[in-house]
Image (cartoon, helix red, strand yellow):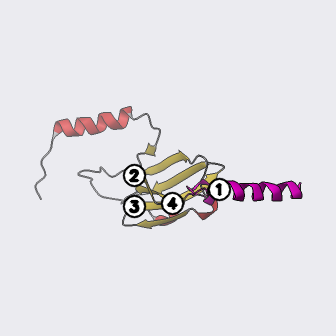
Amino acid sequence: MAMKFDPFRELDRVAGALLDTRQGLRLMPMDLYREGDHYILSADLPGIDPGSVDIDVDGQLLTIRAERTLRNIEGVKWLTRERESGSFLRQLNLGQGIDIDAISARYENGVLSVTIPVSERAKPRKIEIMSGEDAQAVRGDKAVEA
């Protein structure tokens, strides 16, 4: 098997590893969009064991953690090893108007999909407009209750 050695690529890889200031946390690229009354978050986590993925909500903070571990094969001579092991972390502030209890997630083909529903009270709603007589009747009922 012929392999082409590129000294500049190797130098770039080594320099990147030495100058990496993320302290072990790896990039977790994601997309986030709203579809109807749900937000959909899709994060790339290729090669991750689904059992290592942890999603939690603390207040309005959504945290996604994952761990990739690579097999350590004894007695082999590596020609190249670009796949990295390590931890992945991503945090998002959900803000108000999210139904935190109904958040769901699935992991398929290296992509983590998190569905974040909008709460009922944050959804747009139509306000009924009353005519003069209807409005007086409603105000009269409230005066009786008070």
What is the three-letter code of the residue carrying label 2?
A: Asp
Front label number (2 vs 4): 4
Q: Earlier in the sequence, mark 4 or mark 1?
A: 4
Q: Residue 31 carries which label?
A: 2
Say which of 66 and 42 sits in front: 42
Whole-percent x and y of residue 101?
64, 62
- Disc 4 to disc 3, C-alpha distance: 22 Å
**Which numbered disc covers residue 131?**
1
In whole angstroms, how far apart are the C-alphas of marks 2 and 4?
A: 17 Å
Left or right: residue 96 compared with residue 114: right
Q: Assess whether residue 131 is covered by the magenta stretch.
A: yes
Mark 1 or 2 closer to N-term? Answer: 2
Q: Distance between the residues labelled 1 and 2?
A: 46 Å
Residue 63 inside the magenta-drawn segment: no
Q: Which mark is residue 111?
A: 3
139 left or right, relative to 6 = right
- Disc 3 marks which amino acid? Val
> Picture coordinates of residue 110 (x, y %)?
38, 62
Whole-number angstrom distance, CA of label 3 to CA of label 1: 53 Å
Residue 118 location, x and y as percent? 56, 57
Q: Name the foreground residue: 52 vs 121.
A: 121
Q: Earlier in the sequence, mark 3 or mark 2?
A: 2
Identify the mark nearer the N-term, 3 or 1.
Answer: 3
Region in magenta: 118-146
Q: Where is residue 35 in the image (x, y as percent from the top left)?
A: 44, 59
| Residue nearest the observer in this picture, 84 or 109 | 109
Circle 1 crowding by C-alpha within 10 Å: few under 14, some 14–19, many from 20: few
User: Alpha-carbon neighbours of circle 2 within 10 Å: few (<14), some, or many (≥20)?
Assistant: few
Q: Nearer the viewer, mark 3 or mark 1?
A: 1
Which mark lies nearer to you, 4 or 3?
4
Dot 1 amino acid type? Ser
Secondary structure beneath label 3: strand
